[in-house]
Image: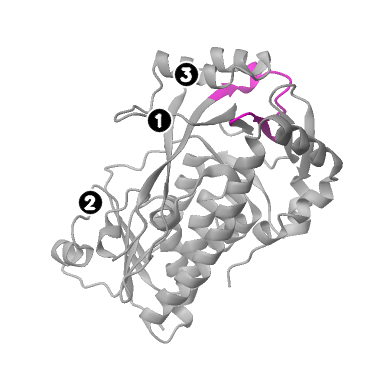
Amino acid sequence: MHLDKVAIVGAGMAGLAAALSFSRLGVACDIFEEADALVGVGAGLQMSPNASAILREFGILANLERVWTEPREIGLASGRSLRRLASVPAGEFARNRWGAPYGVLHRATLQQALLQAVEADPLCTVRLGTPIRGNPREALRELTGTSYPLVIGADGVWSNVRAAITNAPQPDFSGNIAWRFTVPLSEAPDWLPRDSVTALLGPASHLVAYPLSEMGVINIVAIASGISPGETWDATASDSQRRMLIQQFRAWSPEVTKLLSRSGQPTFWPLHQVTPGRWHNGSDIVLIGDAAHAMMPFAAQGAAMAIEDAFVLALEVEKATSLPAALSNFETVRAARAAKVRARGAFNRFAYHARGPFRIGRDIVLSLRPPQSLAADFDWLYGFRAG
């Protein structure tokens, strides 16, 4: 089935990837973004082979490879002792085993690459400063005079498009806080490798670090559980919130708490996920990315799942005999995939944040598993190819 044009609400990773996915099939895309400018927020992200393979299809991977870092490995270490526990090889190993590279880069780098590809595409139009409120079909028709056959809600965890779908997912605070900050490469401690992703595991918390070569820094995300953000919070951590961060890591190695104490001003982000629910209205509105399945970052797959969603949705629409059938098939295949990724994230959270005897057992099991064996656990995730 071929559509002449689709409307995409949201110009984040999911929305821009959706535009490129549909345009490569000859479908025109109008993208509507509430923000007046696309400013790179957040910090780093990990782009695993299941997503980088799609970026290759978009024609933007080669440019990203020039600026990102391909980590030598993804290592696990104890937050208490800094002792290495296990590792999964990446680098050339990832290219050979999963058919595409594993890279780490700043979120803004990826967003700009996607945006530049969209802006250079004659089938795509981006309209900034254009919020879509209320019934999206009516709002778009009033705004543009066009009745789009398909409206794609790519507007994140706080999606407005979601209100047009009965029994849609709803935002839910996860009970976890992400603290994000960077450290100049020249000031990073020796126990943080410059060429790898490192996950430090500790009681009720963990910390992930990796280099952002295009920024000259090491990106650090510290995630702690059991903290309520209260009714209001600010993205820039206050002095009291910084003390709360250090308190959460008090049982860790003094080297870690020293790093947290002297870091630049971290950002303080309560992590939200969404509950299960319907992703489409049965006819012409569908959710993708965080709007459909926002999940915790314990599997480092948020951006990758959004990119996969976009690519798969376009393929399902192309091959289906009707739009309702396409949306139903899309939800079926993607909900199953998202649930599996979410389950992996939940397992990682349990393992990463283990206490007492569970922590000891975890460390023993990890230390006994060779890197190739651990890599095989990710074949279903990193080896996925849409279509």
Q: Which residue is mark 3?
A: 244
The reply to whether the C-beta atoms of the residues labelled 3 and 1 are less than 8 Å apart is: no
| Mark found first going from the N terminus, 1 or 2 | 2
Residue bounds of the magenta highlight: 182-204
Nearer the camera: disc 3 or disc 1: 1
| Dot 3 alpha-carbon crowd within 10 angstroms: few under 14, some 14 to 19, many 20 or more | some
Q: Which is more foreground, mark 2 or mark 3?
A: 3
Q: CA distance from mark 1 to mark 2?
A: 30 Å
Residue 307 lies left or right of residue 352; in this view the side is left
The residue closer to the viewer here, 6 or 279, is 279
From this viewpoint, is residue 46 visible? no
Residue 368 vs 130, above or below: the answer is: above
Secondary structure under the numbered disc 1 in the rendered image? loop
Locate residue 126, reporting x and y percent.
31, 55
- Tag 2 near tag 3, CB within 8 Å: no
Q: Which residue is mark 1?
A: 228
Give residue 131's mark.
2
Q: Amino acid at mark 3?
A: Met
| Secondary structure state at the residue bearing disc 2 | loop
**Who is closer to the viewer here, 43 or 300?**
300
Q: Residue at x 18, y 58 (%)?
A: 134
The x and y percentages for residue 105 are 57, 40
- In this rendering, position of residue 88 left or right of residue 109: right
Label 3 element class: helix
Residue lying at 48% horizontally and 49% vertically, measured from the top left: 295
Sort mark 2 into few (<14), some (14-19) or many (20+) by Cα contacts within 10 Å. Answer: some
